[in-house]
Image (cartoon, grey):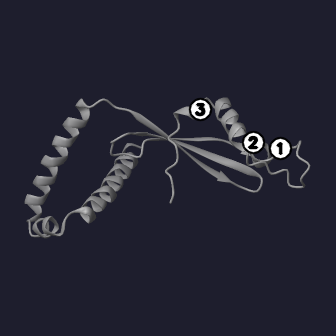
Amino acid sequence: ARRLRSLLRRCWLGARLLLAALRLPEAACEAAATLGTERLDDSLQRTLGRAAEEEEDAPKSEELVLAIDVGATRTKLLLCAMTVGGCSPGRVRRLPPVPTARLWQNPALESEDKFDPEGAPARVRDYLLTCGVVSSRLRPPPLLG
């Protein structure tokens, strides 16, 4: 399990380094591309080591993100607790699946499908509370547009 976590951390770091390299100005990218492997490794280790030391001194805060997969018969929820500014995806908790109708339908409605998007957020909040998750701690979704 430890080796798997280490491999996942390295994959996550590799993806983040690739994104950082893609955001580099062209001149910095050209200069880095001409560095020898040892010099690049040394520079990267010093930079990341310094960043890790600074991060250890910084206060940690946690961000909760909820993923919802609405299926025909059941809805699955995945909660991810991420350290803000950290370099790993964080802890993941799979909540028990819940019947889709329980969250997204209202039996009191007269419509055939009983679909109730206006009442769904309150039912999702109630369900999260039964799982020990306070919805006000969840990060709001980004605005699209």
Question: Tags 2 and 1 in contact by the CB under 8 Å rule?
Answer: yes
Disc 2 residue type (three-letter): Gly
Residue drawn at (21%, 63%) of the image = 24
Q: Is residue 43 above or below residue 22?
A: above
Nearer-N-terminus badge (3/1): 1
Which residue is under mark 1? 106
Q: Is residue 124 left or right of residue 34?
A: right
Q: Which mark is residue 136?
A: none
Nearer-N-terminus badge (2/1): 1
- Residue 44 x %, y %: 16, 53
Q: Is residue 59 above or below residue 115?
A: above
Q: Which mark is residue 119?
A: 2
Give the image quarter of residue 98.
top right
Disc 3 residue type (three-letter): Val
Residue drawn at (56%, 33%) of the image = 136
Which residue is under mark 3? 133
- Residue 35 x %, y %: 8, 65
Q: Which residue is farthest front?
A: 145
- Comparing marks 3 and 1, which lies closer to the viewer? 1
